[in-house]
Image: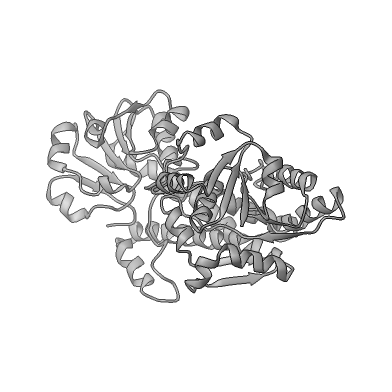
Amino acid sequence: MNICVVGTGYVGLVTGACLADFGMAVVCVDKDEAKIASLQSGHIPIYEPGLEEIVAKNERAGRLTFTTDLKSSIERALAIFIAVGTPPNPDGSPDLTFVRQVAEAIAEHMNEYKVVVTKSTVPTGTGRMIEQILRSNDGEREFSVVSNPEFLREGSAISDFLRPDRIVIGASDARAIEVMKEIYSPLFLAETPFVITDVASAELIKYASNGFLAVKISFINEIARLCELMGADVHAVARGMGLDRRIGAQFLLAGPGFGGSCFPKDTAAAIDLARQHGYRFRIIEAAVGVNCETKARMTEKIQAAAGPLKDRTAAVLGLSFKPGTDDIRESPALAVITDLVAAGAAVRVFDPAAMGNARAVFPDLYYATDAYDCARGADVLVLATEWNEFRALDFGRLEKLMRSKTVVDLRNVYEPRELKAAGWSYTGVGRS
């Protein structure tokens, strides 16, 4: 089967590489000539463990190619996956400009039956919009419109695609459903649950899922605040909650709030979607509000631990919004750094993957070579992202490098008693 994936961003590149790994002939298309040339030369523009290897493997096998030729790619493909960006507008609604442009191009170059699959995260009603575009440009060609939302976690996207919790297929005709089942046949044979539904429901599943997970994060951060006020330990509370199978332990880790490319954008879009239908999504609104307050509260914790920050030096470990990625979009670490700089502190930073992206936002910070170089001469050490290499720091070595034995652990990686027994001033999130 010939497949065309339009867009070589995070979702498009992972989708194209993994579908090629399923044995499909996949062409990934992008209008950015420099990006396509870079991909053709073997350079992967994003940091995602395992992606470079799977791209190289399928390029060598001839199943995966990259091009800027959208016309011929559309003409050859049976299934066309739309995986372009949907950045937020100022009001929180997603900008569907690129989705419309791709739909118009498909309508122009459609030469036979096509299955047009929306992989981008889009609001309910987008499938209907795409169908209208395809019909208005050429009423004679046969086509089907499908919603197939992605549920990829940055840092584990390859595993999530190849071993997903479920495959959601929103379609209105049996022919399209059979094509999608053929595309995902390795997962169907592996008894992965398939959710077959209408297009509108499939579109809403993605927003509902991310909105609910964002609520869980904000909820446990509210519990963490209560723990600090009451002298309780959020680790114990979260464990007690998570063992209830109705609740589950995932996303009950207190910290500096959620960030990344999905949760902030998708919660804002869900709020906007409800608003368009005359309804206030108050639970998600509250989750977003708590998240903003949580990020702001982290700097207060640092100041309470280290004292006035003016003319002090803060060492921040971690810049990406989570470990395993170089994505700094809406990262809580960046919010902390912004507040530290505004308070007059000198900031030193280190991250295993995200420093290149961070330099574009904060060109004047000191970018260290490792965690210990970052801590040199610092008055306070702030652990902002829980990369594995930060989980076993040598605090004896850090003691000799820093001016003060003060650590603020925004990810609750370390045990307070152990560090306090070693003479450190330790501050976590929601831990007495």
Q: Quadrant of the N terminus?
A: bottom right
Q: Position of residue 155 (x, y in %)?
A: 41, 50
At which x and y percent is residue 294?
A: 44, 49
Q: Decide if residue 222 is on the left or right side of residue 381.
A: right
Q: Find residue 355 and report its horizontal and vertical position in percent.
A: 38, 33
Residue most extreme to the top: 364
Quick check: 145 left or right of 137? left
Residue at x 27% of width, y 30% of height:
369
- Viewer can see residue 53: yes
Which residue is at a point 42% across and 61% down the rendered structure image?
251
Q: Nearer the viewer, residue 196 or 41?
A: 41
Please state which of residues 257 and 324 is positioned toward the viewer in this rendering: 324
| Residue 379 located left or right of residue 54 | left
Quadrant location of residue 109?
top right
Q: Residue at x 17, y 50 (%)?
A: 420
The single residue placed furthest to the front in the displayed view is: 61
**Residue 44 image offset from top left, x and y in percent:** 46, 38
Work out whether 228 lies above or below 190: above
Quadrant in which the C terminus appears:
bottom left
> What's the colour scheme?
one colour
Q: Nearer the viewer, residue 230 or 423?
A: 423
